[in-house]
Amino acid sequence: MSLTTHSGSSTSPRSADSESLGAAFARRRSQHPLIFFVARRLVALVFLCLGVTFMAFVLTHLVPADVAAANLGVHQGSNPVAVRLYNERYGLDKPLPVQYEVYLAHLLHGDLGVSEQSGRPVGDDLAAAIPATAELAITSMILALPIGITLGVVAALRRNRLTDQVLRVLSLAGMSTPQFWLALVALYFFFYLLGWVPGSGRLDAAYPAPPHVTGLFTIDSLLAGQLDIFANAVHHLVLPAAVLAAFNIGLFTRFTRSAVLEVLKNDYVRTARAKGLPEWIIIPRHVLRAAGPPVLTIVGLAFGNVMTGTVLVENIFSWPGIGQYSYASATTLDLPSIVGVMLFFAIVYIVLNLSVDILHGVIDPRLQVT
């Protein structure tokens, strides 16, 4: 008598459905790799933002111990009624998990607390300071990118020659020179001695601020057709932007040189030259395209640095941006403002890293499957 079993010859409906769903997902992923690539990065962005808010929440509860007193100031912090109302508003009289939920709810509504130094909401202070820093940072990058990348390509093409040696020394000097010292020297020569540029501020006292649209005086003055204010705003931008650009010019020169030298070793570049293609076609079409991803990473980090690391330069040029605001917040121990600046700095780097990742996936589709 023989017994036959069919346990290995059939598949359960649940496993079949799972396999079909997996196959459908893999097919859609192969059809739209960029969409799934961006979706994964966005999911990671959500968790990063939650991590940053958690660190900010911990900071507000550890330094100092009495959050209400730190936010209300010396006079209101000694008022029991004011402290009780503040604790009720921000949920500080509730358990820590509930406090974190209330903290997130306030953040989603843009409520970062009230600044002790200005007496205004921290969100309003940041909204007024960020456009000034963004205008300065964007201008410095507009100056640094074409100059640094061009010098890096020239240094790579003239490797170990006099031009390369000079550019390497200049780039090292630009990266090594302290920005605050360079700002003081530039201010002394170009403002005090020569009088070519203004010394401080975003506009001369005789010019009113243009109608607020973006907060960038150059853009807003152009939108309003105020060419005289635009020219004055550019006049004020030149010197601090050039000081900030000096470091990035050296950085872009060195990294572009290294990236281009790596690409020049490849066989397809030698083949293109053997075919007789001119350099003005080989460099942009074959070399720079392949050298783009590492240079793009450095550009993203550099833009984050000029958006968040302009404290000394902004104070020297009396530039009313986020750097000057963060300096004033630190010197006055204004905890709500310090936390607001910290959140802004974190968001800048998170968004820039996300943008660089997406651009890498666009430039090199092979990265979309990783």
Image: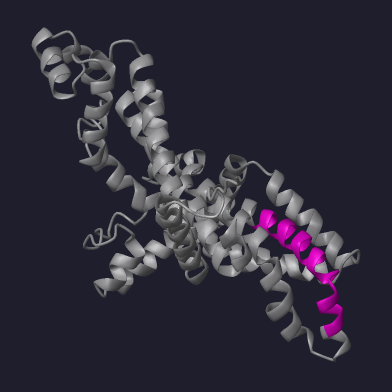
Residue 85 on image: x %, y %: 10, 18
Magenta portion: prevailing SS class: helix
Q: Is residue 270 found inside the magenta-colored segment of the image? A: yes
Side of 248 relative to 13 (left or right)? right
Residue 144 on image: x %, y %: 59, 61
Query: Which residue is located at x 21 percent, y 62 percent?
Result: 211
Side of 212 relative to 219 (left or right)? left
Determine whether 25 is above or below 240 in the image. below
> For residue 263, what is the image quadrant?
bottom right
> For residue 81, what is the image quadrant?
top left
The colouring scheme, among rainbow, by chain, secondary structure or one colour, is one colour
Residue 25 on image: x %, y %: 45, 61
| Camera-side residue of 185 and 370 | 370
Query: Which residue is located at x 60 percent, y 64 percent?
Result: 145
The reply to whether residue 136 is visible in this rendering is no
Q: Is residue 258 found inside the magenta-colored segment of the image? A: yes
Side of 126 relative to 85 (left or right)? right
Side of 238 relative to 172 (left or right)? left
Seen from this angle, which residue lies furthest bottom? 276
The C terminus sits in image quarter:
bottom right
Residue 59 on image: x %, y %: 39, 22
| Camera-side residue of 344 and 125 | 344
Magenta stretch, residue numbers: 249-271
How many badges with numbers are in the image?
0
The N terminus sits in image quarter:
top right
Determine whether 278 is above or below 344 in the image. below
| Camera-side residue of 368 and 45 | 368
The reply to whether residue 9 is visible in this rendering is yes
Query: Which residue is located at x 36 percent, y 30 percent?
Result: 339
Seen from this angle, which residue lies furthest front? 1
